[in-house]
Image: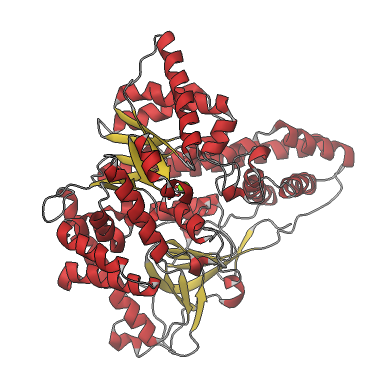
Amino acid sequence: MSFGLKLRSADPIIRTGGNSQSSSSVFPSPLLVTNLLSNDEVILDGIAASPGIAHGPAFVYLRGDLEVPSYELKEDGVEAEITRFEEALLETRREISEIRDKVASSLGEGEARIFDAHLLVLEDCALIDEVISAIRTTNRNVEHCFEKVSRRYITFFKSMEDEYLKERVADIEDVSRRLLQTLIGHSKLDLSQLSADGIIVSEDLTPSDTAGLDRRQLKGFITDAGGKTSHTVIMARSLRIPAVVGLHDATQRIKEGEYILIDGYEGTVFVNPSEERLYQYGKLADKRRKLEEIYGESLSGPSTTSDGKTINLMANIEGVEDLERALAMQADGVGLYRTEALFLRGQKYPDEATQYEEYSRVVAMAAGQTVIIRTLDVGGDKTIGDESVQEDNSFMGFRGIRFCLGNPEIFKTQLRAILRASVHGNVKIMYPMISGLAELRKANEILNSVKEELCSEGIGFDSSIDVGAMVEVPSTAMIIDLVAAECDFLSIGTNDLIQYLLAVDRLNDRVADLYQPAHPAVIRTLKTIIEGGIAAGKPVSLCGEIAGDAIFTSLLIGMGASSLSFTPSLMPEVKYFLQRIDTNRAKVLVAEILKMKETSQILQYLKEFKKETLGDLI
Ligand code: PEP
Ligand code: MG
């Protein structure tokens, strides 16, 4: 077990060709580049976690073992030792509360909640009592006793199969490290105190490490561990700090002070980048910045094609904070409100009042714009602390609507909360993972029973609320006429649809190259679904990741999608592109693409089309 973080060197050496150069966010000019060494470039591939390009000297930030002292207490020393423990608890709580407030004011309450979990660890009576009792029975110092007790907790949680509980290990480790540092009197390494800007290379970064990040100083980070959904990565995205994770052994391969270049768009890290590489990325970064400015100008304009067809550009959100960002990006409402986040927080199954409050806030804030609330899509990678949801083949198991139909009380509670919130604005309900008519009908039966219940209780709701199905299971695509006939709208979840259609686990990086949104089978299936919806007179939206990928925009418009829903930060680029698409041209594009047999050919064609549409811009 290791606690504590160790910075290898306080004063990083920047890789130069004999010259030293202060790190700057500006890429070297061709002239400067010639002064830099250009040999020994090593390329590391990881997961693109937070977009952006950055370069600078590496700060290798390692978790080292804290030397935990162990000694016998003097006679009558027990009470003083317990007081020392209580003071350290208070001090650590104060520190964490400060970090919490800092995060809450810069990133919002949602991001700050993780620190509430940390505070709970420090308030855990069982843990505190065990440490006090260990001090009394062993007559040894508090550091020794605390480390032993917390280690036992960590081992216990680590041994659990439950992913949610495993995640709590990081909280306990983080808090235990802080408390031990306070007891031992070690200064805590605060990343915000770094004197020069650089790129952090770490095994992993805990939420309290990243809370100290100062955007003006830190250009980016890379980690050995992690996936796209870790707390740290979520924060990096909100702070717009480029990041690459899942590099496995970057801390072994990169030395303190070595110059690195990270490409957060592609998930690539260049160690000792060559002159050409730096120059090429310098140009790319400049271009990106200029492009973002230009794209941003589209936001105040309408969500229409060049020939005047309106396509709603909506936001995928997980809560109020995301909605704030979405509104700032002029989103045309919420196309997918993922409600799982509420279930993944402290309370395992939030009660009706908690859900009602949360949904109502979102709906009211949307001020009359559509909010499509998706019912609980637990399972797959979205595990909650419930053993019945832990499965070997979880993506094809008891997830989404299957879980809700199998747990009608949980489902009903959510439906009641959504229906009650519907009086505050324009709400629609959407079921995830529908694989056939029976599920859709069963879900609607439960919805109707909840409506009747509310009526008999005299509680108001939108009685003509629209109900839609996500199309993300291939079986539903095959019977789209039947499903569309019994829904008010359809929304294609390409993230799952692609994984089921191509039999490629969307989380498994060993088969990541086979996860191909431009596969001809995906293209044909999308067309079948959209045409099926249109034939039934029902609008079809897209809310998977490809909805926010501008190279697919014209294809989806050409097929007839009525709205696209995606992460708000992508709004400027998609909107800019949309305003330049002509629907007739997009239809021709679809016809051309449908003739193609190879994914690579389709991708190339889509890229060329975008390039042509944007002219000189890219
Ligand atoms: C999808 O599958 O495309 C989707 C939007 O849902 P999620 O990513 O939440 O599974
Ligand atoms: Mg899905």
Closer to us: 58 or 327: 327
Residue closest to the eye, 403 or 79? 403
- Residue in view at x 42 percent, y 18 percent: 451
Please tell me whether residue 306 is drawn above or below residue 106 in the rendered image. below
Left or right side of 506 for 87: right
Residue at 87% across, 47% down:
72
Residue 5, compared with residue 405, is above or below; it is below
When asked about the image quadrant of residue 458, the answer is top left
The residue lying at 82 percent from left, 35 percent from top is 133
Quadrant showing the C terminus: bottom left
Q: Is residue 397 visible?
A: yes
Identify the residue at horizontal 59%, vertical 71% (top origin): 251
Residue 39 point in image, percent of width and height? 47, 90
Q: Quadrant of the N terminus?
A: bottom right
Here the colouring is secondary structure
Res 578 quadrant in image? bottom left
Is residue 348 visible in the rendered structure shown here? Answer: no
How many labels, in total? 0
- Depth check: 12 or 162 in front? 162
Horizontal side of residue 323 vs 83, given as left or right:
left
Residue 124 in the image: x percent, y percent?
Answer: 68, 34
Q: Residue furthest left?
A: 307
User: Relative to residue 476, is residue 312 drawn left or right?
Assistant: left
Left or right of 495, for residue 539: left
Residue 57 image offset from top left, x and y in percent: 46, 74
Q: Position of residue 616 (x, y in %)?
A: 16, 73
In-front residue for pair 197/505: 505
